[in-house]
């Protein structure tokens, strides 16, 4: 048996949209797949969880044990973005201050849930064991070192790390030239 779903099996899962050349591990889990859009050339590895509103662009990789909890607010992963292993993204989270009750077994009126869309723009890369909290926009080309806690928006083309994540330096933009070359080669192969 192949480790990845076949094209026909992917269609039967019931995604809102599924692109071409998509590799998804049979060991991954999807909740409400009808709310998940997946672009072209996407790979999702073993033991990943995707739940809620999620929009995945083209040429995106989600490594093993990562989780995207999109809820109703949603998570957007832009083209050429990537999640290393054990990354967790939350579009909603309980209030841990003690002012309200927490967890999904409690009715909404007793909870204070913080919510907001999470956006990873084009060429964003997130290192292993990072956590991204709700209502965050990661600007184009920003990168995050391992085990960072991402609680605020990032600057374009920045290298960030820490708890909470802070900008360390600027990131090089060489990948934009490589992207053009790569896409040109793909387009020439199709002709």
Image (spheres, rainbow, N blue to C red):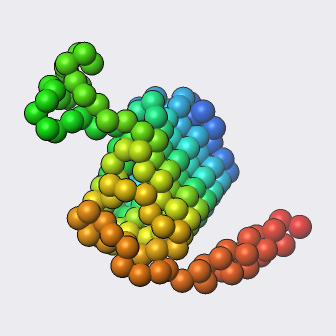
Which quarter of the rendered picture does the C terminus lie within?
A: bottom right
Q: Is residue 108 above or below residue 1?
A: above
Q: Quadrant of residue 113?
A: top left
Can residue 87 be seen here? The reply is no
Work out whether residue 57 or residue 155 is closer to the camera in this orientation and state it: 155
Residue 156 image offset from top left, x and y in percent: 53, 69
Work out whether residue 164 or residue 123 is closer to the camera in this orientation and state it: 164
Q: Is residue 43 above or below residue 100?
A: below
Work out whether residue 71 or residue 182 is closer to the camera in this orientation and state it: 71
* Residue reaching furthest to the left: 98
Residue 42 image offset from top left, x and y in percent: 56, 56
Q: Is residue 50 above or below residue 167?
A: above
Q: Residue at x 37, y 44 (%)?
A: 134
Q: Quadrant of residue 163?
A: bottom left
Q: Residue at x 48, y 67 (%)?
A: 155
Can residue 135 be seen here? The reply is yes
Q: Is residue 138 above or below residue 117?
A: below
Relative placement, left or right, of 28 versus 15 is left
Q: Residue at x 52, y 47 (%)?
A: 76
Residue 132 image offset from top left, x and y in percent: 34, 53
Residue 8 image offset from top left, x and y in percent: 61, 39
* Residue reaching furthest to the right: 191
Q: How many marks?
A: 0
Work out whether residue 164 or residue 34 is closer to the camera in this orientation and state it: 164
Q: Residue at x 26, y 69 (%)?
A: 162
């Amino acid at each position: 048996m192949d480790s990845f779903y076949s094209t026909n099996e992917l269609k039967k899962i019931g995604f809102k949209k599924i692109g071409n050349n998509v590799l998804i591990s049979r060991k991954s889990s999807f909740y409400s797949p009808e709310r998940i859009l997946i672009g072209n050339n996407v790979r999702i590895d073993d033991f990943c969880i995707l739940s809620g509103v999620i929009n995945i662009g083209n040429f995106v990789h989600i490594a093993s044990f990562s989780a995207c909890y999109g809820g109703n607010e949603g998570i957007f992963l832009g083209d050429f973005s990537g999640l290393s292993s054990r990354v967790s993204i939350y579009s909603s989270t309980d209030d841990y201050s003690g002012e309200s009750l927490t967890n999904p077994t409690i009715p909404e009126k007793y909870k204070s849930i913080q919510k907001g869309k999470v956006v990873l723009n084009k060429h964003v890369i997130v290192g292993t064991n990072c956590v991204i909290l709700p209502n965050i926009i990661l600007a184009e080309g920003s990168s995050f070192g391992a085990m960072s806690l991402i609680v605020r928006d990032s600057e374009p083309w920045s290298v960030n790390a820490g708890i909470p994540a802070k900008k360390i330096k600027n990131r090089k933009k060489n990948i934009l030239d490589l992207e053009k070359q790569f896409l040109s080669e793909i387009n020439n192969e199709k002709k």
